[in-house]
């Protein structure tokens, strides 16, 4: 006897049963590819403005999920995140980045060679813009010794 698709004997030879199982293998492949893409892209999305920070011996505080960094470089240029802004446009850039949440903490990083007066001017500009929660960022180190770049935890 020859084999066929329908073994029911001749009645209803045109009726084939439907296969209702979902093949999840392509779905898993897509998820694994997305996972690899995000693992590669995540380190690239961090803020990395080159600045020579002073060393601090204070105990580090927990870092929020999406911190707002304000950087004052040695040439007195101001960066909000990685965007260079003028002092006049500082308030609008921060408002756009924080979505007008003036209770959000602003992390100020200033180059070690910047004069103290310039840092105070920047903090006054932040106060004038309505941002009163300011955190100063420094490199971690013990007893004032300079931390190596591998030890740096901004």
Image (cartoon, rainbow, N blue to C red):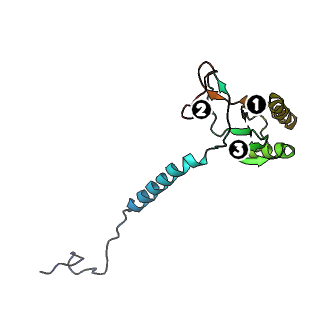
**28 vs 146, nearest the viewer:** 146
Q: Residue at x 46, y 55 (%)?
A: 31
Is residue 95 placed above or below 27 in the rendered structure? above
Give me the C-alpha separation between circle 2 and circle 3.
17 Å
- Pointer 1 or 3: first along the chain: 3
Residue 81 is labelled as 3
Residue 153 is labelled as 2
Left or right: 94 as drawn, with respect to 145: right
Callout in the foreground (1, 2): 2
Q: Which residue is mark 1?
A: 134
Residue 63 is labelled as none
Give the quadrant of residue 119: top right
Left or right: 47 as drawn, with respect to 29: right
Q: Residue at x 87, y 45 (%)?
A: 88
Q: Secondary structure at mark 2?
A: loop
Give the quadrant of residue 87: top right
**144 vs 69, nearest the viewer:** 144
Q: Secondary structure at mark 3?
A: loop
Give me the C-alpha separation between circle 1 and circle 3.
15 Å
Is residue 11 placed above or below 111 in the rendered structure? below
Other residues around mark 3 within 10 Å, as few (<14) / some (14–19) / many (≥20): many
């Amino acid at each position: 006897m020859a084999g066929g698709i329908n073994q029911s004997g001749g009645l209803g030879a045109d009726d084939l049963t439907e296969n209702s199982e979902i093949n999840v293998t392509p779905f898993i492949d897509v998820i694994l590819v997305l996972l690899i893409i995000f693992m590669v892209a995540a380190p690239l999305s961090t803020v990395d403005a080159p600045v020579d920070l002073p060393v601090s011996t204070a105990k580090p505080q927990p870092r929020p999920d999406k911190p707002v960094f304000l950087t004052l470089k040695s040439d007195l240029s101001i960066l909000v995140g990685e965007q260079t802004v003028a002092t006049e446009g500082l308030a609008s850039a921060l408002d756009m980045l924080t979505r007008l949440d003036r209770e959000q903490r602003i992390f100020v990083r200033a180059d070690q060679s910047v004069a103290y007066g310039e840092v105070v001017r920047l903090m006054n500009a932040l106060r004038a813009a309505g941002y009163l929660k300011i955190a100063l960022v420094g490199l971690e180190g013990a007893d004032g010794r300079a931390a190596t770049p591998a030890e740096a935890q901004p």
